[in-house]
Image: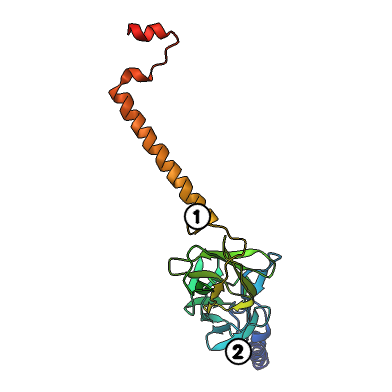
Amino acid sequence: MRYAAASAVALLMLATALLMPFMGGGNAAGAPGDEVTVSGRIVYGLDAYAKPIGLKDVKVTVGTETALSDDDGEFELLIEPGTYEIKFEISGYSVLIWPGAVYEDDDACMVDVNAGGLSLSDTAMVRATGTIYGAVTRADNDSPVQGVTVQVIGPDGKVIASGRTDGDGMYSIECPNRDGYTVSTSSLYLKEMSYENVDLDAGETVRLDFALELKEEATYLFGFDLTHSLMLIGGIIGLFLLIFAISYRIHIGKHPGSSKIYSDPGKKDQE
């Protein structure tokens, strides 16, 4: 009987050992060899309907496993539970994984992947910008033009960013990377000019030069266009009024009684 009981106990222990990997209540991190899913969506900016835009072809590395985000910015890979270094690789971005955790460009951070996997659905790319720059000149003499407004307009017709040319006729505008921009000029006495369907990638620099013609309706006075001429005349009038006011104050200081108004002419004579 004792031999039979011992044999039964041994068989029970063997069965328990064989069934343990398939029973619940084991290690929370999962048994070695069990792969779990790490997934998420990488987005940047908002579209015309204020919805996040997915970012394609971002390389996501968790440990030794890698995946590329699809057209919607989504990625997914399988890995065993554990603590890993996660890395996002794409030029010109900072990576926001969750609020308060920002990692510059391709720098990495550590994440814990448990038996339930890991979802990075809030992963976002920020500082996804490029630069549009160039020179603005007059078409008739190639001289640089200062003060011309250059606007970057989105496909929805909204102005995304703008800038003005400096003394050398140069402008530089940083704006979110996007396809289908329109870049146009605005000036009081120069005709407008536009570039359409301008595509801008993250970290890219696009040069657009403008050679602008004079508006036929522009009016000139004293060698300046009408607006600047009016400003010049206004300045001269303002200077004259200032000189008159100062002269009047000096006169009153020297002749205090000259500023009094008399209703009775005889009263002035008495004084």
- Give the structural element (helix, strand or loop) at label 2: loop
Q: Is residue 241 shown above or below 258?
A: below
Residue 96 in which image quadrant: bottom right
Residue at the image point whose x is 39% and y is 16% from the top: 260
Q: Is residue 50 shown above or below 247?
A: below
| Quadrant that contains the N terminus | bottom right
The picture places residue 76, in percent across and down from the top left corner, at: 64, 82
Query: Distance of mark 1 from mark 2, alpha carbons?
Result: 78 Å
Of callouts 1 and 2, the N-terminal one = 2
Most foreground residue, 191 or 83: 191
- Give the structural element (helix, strand or loop) at label 1: helix
Q: Give the class, few, some or many, for how many residues have Cα within 10 Å of label 1's Cα (few <14, many ≥20).
A: some
Most foreground residue, 172 or 149: 149
Q: Is residue 136 shown above or below 189?
A: below
Q: Give the class, few, some or many, for how many residues have Cα within 10 Å of label 2's Cα (few <14, many ≥20).
A: few
Q: Is residue 240 left or right of residue 69?
A: left
The picture places residue 216, in percent across and down from the top left corner, at: 62, 64
Residue at the image point whose x is 38% and y is 20% from the top: 259
Question: Can you tell which mark lies on residue 228?
Answer: 1
The residue wearing badge 2 is 33
Q: Residue furthest left?
A: 254
Q: Is residue 158 left or right of residue 173?
A: right
In the image, what residue type sits under mark 2? Answer: Gly
Residue at the image point whose x is 58% and y is 74% from the top: 177
Q: Is residue 260 left or right of residue 177?
A: left
